[in-house]
Amino acid sequence: MPSTSISYLAFLALVFALYWAVHRHRVARLGVLLVSSLYFYTVWTPLPVLVFFWGAAVDHLIVRGLARTQSSRLRKLLVTASVVSNLGMLATFKYAELFRETARSLLAPWGIEVRQEPFGLILPIGLSFLCFQAISYVVDVYRGKASAEHSYLEHLLYLLFFPRVVSGPIVRASALLDRFNDVPTLTTEQGGRAMYRIAVGLVKKMVIADVLGSGLVDPVFGDPAAYTSAECAMAAVAYTFELYFDFSGYSDIAIGAAALLGFEFPENFARPYLAKNLFEFWNRWHMSLSSWLRDYLYIPLGGNRASKPRVLFNLMTVMVLGGLWHGADWRFAVWGAVHGVGLCITRTWWWIRGGRPEKESVSWLRAGVGMLFTFTLVVLTRVVFRAPDMTHAAEFYERMLLFIPGLANVSMLVWIMLAVAVVSHALPMKLYELGGTLFVRLPVPVRAVVLVGIGLGIRHLASVEARPYVYLQF
């Protein structure tokens, strides 16, 4: 049930009505959310939901144990058990095939045989997001930042809460689980802004992202040799914007859907392609993942408090593992490693200069050059991210380096949508907020007409073929 489908919007409307009909009764409202979340997930993949029943049971027992012991050694053992359990599930279902194939390739020259048949395990949708969210809760309880006084069913609901279960954002316990005891409220303005947010997300995904994907990205990446160098470069830029509008569109729908139920989710994007350096880019892109990697991996490794060589090692470790988190393919590790090298070079340059540029005034020329350099690096590395394998990526780069001119295969609709993508991404956030303010001030009948108009526009402009979210594969 994609979040862009009519069936999802009808499902959301039904949950909304049931939830607010019983919202004053804690057990009833949480029951509505749990049943609807289980239904939503099982529509995607029924059997893998059992994995989360098991994972939630293990973590729930660990959390209970943390609440009942003050032994530092035992508490560390419990947290370690949770991390091993969650990463073990991730390794089994997501990376077992990668490890098998890698071992087969490395051991074959030595005459050591590894099973040829794939394991055939079904990857539960959203497993990467759910495992990270599960770990964050246990660690937060250990650190005293989250309460352990929740039932098993509440724990399960925290993991499977339907607005964000498929592709995030990664939500901390303070933003969801610790709110389950609060009687929710929803003003007319808050409801209007939530609907506006969902509408913006639908436009981002179904109009901008899908048109760029079907109109240019898919055909060029499918057969780069059939296109000019300029068209390949355009496809790389288009994919960079497709990925942003696809994922940020999903995040907008998730944030809006959660707001309709009285929950406030964290923002996931902040105009990342306007970043002036790679550190700023990662502070603006997929912020729930970036902050998770910072709080639960980078800082525990020593963060910036260690020696300079160790800081660089920490950066590389986080980026390689963060890259590999995106998929069971070593090209994602390569993609992360390239970004890690860029971050290390940037950090080293700051050390040489004696400070970070954020702490000093930067001329518009310097800012513009930094922005262009950062965006160019992001676009070039996106080729590895999008290509099916490294061989295909190398062919794509080789085609671009031939410098063959010509953009005959770039349609007018793609040009228009790319212009819309660039302009809308560069607009100040205040303009989006102003749009939400104007929307909620409209009379209800006018609001309904606006939403119907948006729906008809999407139907007219969007690709006929339903395109899944890019981040479903992660």
Image: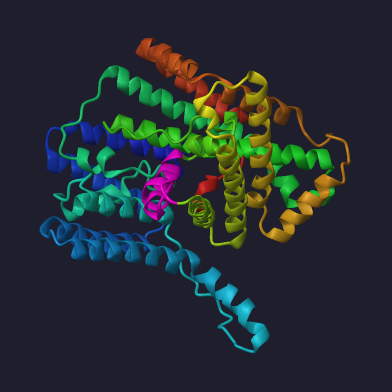
Q: Which residues are magenta?
A: 287-306
Q: Nearer the viewer, residue 422 or 440?
A: 422
Q: Is residue 63 left or right of residue 264?
A: left
Q: Is residue 77 left or right of residue 117?
A: left
Q: Nearer the viewer, residue 385 or 69?
A: 69
The answer to whether residue 44 is seen in the rendering is: no
Q: Nearer the viewer, residue 345 or 251?
A: 345
Task: Give percent across and percent down for residue 163.
Answer: 36, 41
Residue 291 belongs to magenta span: yes
Q: How is the image coloured?
A: rainbow
Task: Give percent across and percent down for residue 258.
Answer: 33, 35
Q: Is residue 356 above or below residue 292?
A: above
Main SS, magenta region, reads helix
Report the residue at 63% width, 51% height from top. Answer: 338
Task: Give percent across and percent down for residue 449.
Answer: 45, 16
Q: Is residue 284 left or right of residue 266?
A: right
Report the residue at 31% width, 30% height from top. Answer: 260
Task: Give percent across and percent down for residue 48.
Answer: 38, 62
Residue 145 belongs to magenta span: no
Q: Is residue 103 above or below residue 193?
A: below
Report the residue at 18% width, 32% height from top. Answer: 21
Q: Nearer the viewer, residue 451 or 405?
A: 405
The answer to whether residue 123 is seen in the rendering is: yes
